[in-house]
Amino acid sequence: MRFAKPERFRTIRKAIASLFFCFALASACFSQVPEILKVEPPSWWLGSTVNPVRLMISGRNLTGARPKTLGRGLRVVGAPITNARGSYLFMDVWIAPNAPPGQKQIRITAPGGSTNASFETLSPLGRPGRFQKGSRAPDFMDTTRRTSTKLKNTSGRSQRCANW
């Protein structure tokens, strides 16, 4: 019966160790921790007629991210959407009518790890001062009035252009 030489076992062990190291390095490079740069809109009013609110979260490494709200008052509605580069995450958040105002946290979990994004719920807007029945909008918002001016184009001929 012939036995393999000890050098051969060492070579095989080195090859297996180097393959394991390459695999670990590759997985570390491809699964990076998500990073949040900005949340738009950063806040929203309680009691608003626009509910749920669509949030656009910009950052890095957001591909395959799953958002989850932490605490009371917010709930993720529907499936989130990310772009191909993983730099934008779009999600709908429903704000409960009895949610307390203040900072809320949204946990973003991606294959490379997780991070938190902040979103603030604000107290409801007061009713006085809004455009209500009988109030007049400022003149700059009047879309029924048009003015026209003469503009000169590059050919030297004048033409009429309506300004809204």
Image: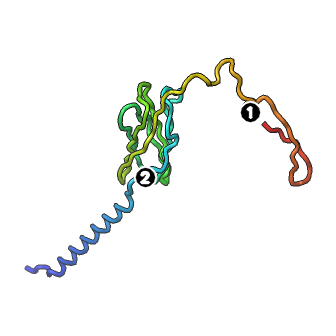
Q: CA distance from mark 1 to mark 2?
A: 42 Å
What scheme was used to colour the molecule?
rainbow
Residue 90 in the image, given as x and y percentages of width and height: 49, 43
133 left or right, relative to 44? right
The residue labelled by disc 2 is 35
In the image, 1 versus 42, the foreground residue is: 42
**Vertical order, 149 against 6 (above or below):** above
- x 57%, y 22%: residue: 127
Q: Which residue is mark 1?
A: 140
Q: Which residue is drawn at the image coordinates 48% and 29% (left, top)?
A: 123
Between disc 1 and disc 2, whose residue precedes? 2
Q: Is residue 48 left or right of residue 68?
A: right
The residue at the far right in this view is 157
- Residue 72 percent across, percent down from the top left: 37, 32
Report the front residue among 49 and 11. 49
Position of residue 163 relative to residue 29, above or below, is above
Under circle 1, the secondary element is: helix
Residue that extends furthest to the left in the rendered view of this protein: 1
| Amino acid marked by disc 2 | Glu
